[in-house]
Image (spheres, rainbow, N blue to C red):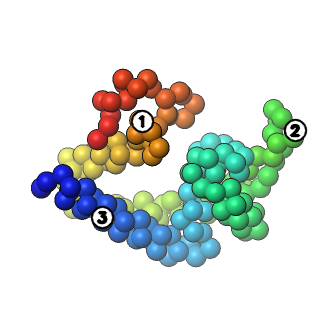
Amino acid sequence: METARAVETIQREMTVFARRARASAGRLHPELSLVSYTLLGHLEESGGCRATDLAAHYALDKSTVSRQVAALERAALVERREDPGDHRVRLLHLTGSGRRVLAHVTDRRRAAFRERLARWPEEDLERFAAYLTRYNAVVEDGGGPRPERGRPAPAAEEATDRRP
């Protein structure tokens, strides 16, 4: 397959994947959009953060994050707490209910992926996982690898080895 056609196929299939992910989010938990689910996941992974950090991490408009966070607060899935390091800052944290809902939806999502991939050979699963990791490691704006949490981005010469 020539490069242009392969890229077109990848773009089309990624679009289908994104549409299915958004549609399935509502089936997994009616009040939890895909954006809300990803925000909850980030809050769990990070141990809490500011709303502006969420907006920056996901390259979302602050008003979008504000609306999502307000809905999550109304649903009692997140709460704001004072930052012990800076009392002027309020950090978002999952509530107990938020943790339970996130765990439930995550379990259902994993089960759906396991079912869909059940007939794939182990080598294909490992290759697919590696390709997705490689694809998602590239930062949208600069083309270099995304820095791992808590670590600076690698030097440009190191980044060239990871580009697709």
How far across and down, in percent of the image, does residue 110 sit?
A: 42, 59
The answer to whether 89 appears left or right of 94 in the picture is right
Q: Residue at x 66, y 45 (%)?
A: 53
Q: Which residue is mark 3?
A: 13
Gap between marks 3 and 2, in whole Å? Answer: 46 Å
Residue 24 in percent (x, y) is at 46, 72
Q: Earlier in the sequence, mark 2 or mark 1?
A: 2
The answer to whether marks 3 and 1 mark residues whose Cβ atoms lie closer than 8 Å is no
| Amino acid type at image mark 2 | His
For marks 3 and 1 on the same chain, the one whose residue lies earlier in the sequence: 3
Name of the residue lying farthest toward the left: 1
Q: Quadrant of the N terminus?
A: bottom left
Mark 3 near mark 2, Cβ–Cβ under 8 Å?
no
Q: Secondary structure at mark 2?
A: strand
Give the label, 3 or 2, closer to the camera. Answer: 3
Disc 3 to disc 1, how far (Cα)? 23 Å
Q: Mark yes or no: residue 77 visible.
A: no
Across the whole image, how many numbered discs are drawn on residues?
3
Image quadrant in which the C terminus is located: top left
Measuring from the top left, give residue 145's x and y in whole percent: 42, 36
Q: Mark 2: few, some, or many residues within 10 Å (few <14, many ≥20)?
A: few
Q: Nearer the viewer, residue 99 or 7?
A: 7
Residue 78 visible (yes or no): yes
Instruction: Give neighbour class at mark 3: few <14, some 14-19, many 20+ (Cα, 10 Å).
Output: few
Q: Position of residue 39 (x, y in %)?
A: 61, 56
Residue that label 1 marks = 145
Instruction: Tell me which residue sits at (56%, 72%) in the image.
Output: 29
Amino acid found under the numbered disc labelled 1: Pro
Q: Which of these two is toward me, 145 or 48?
A: 145
Residue behind mark 2: 87
Question: For the residue carrying disc 1, how many other residues have a C-alpha within 10 Å: few (<14), some (14-19), or many (20+)?
Answer: many
Specify the label residue 120 is tagged with.
Answer: none
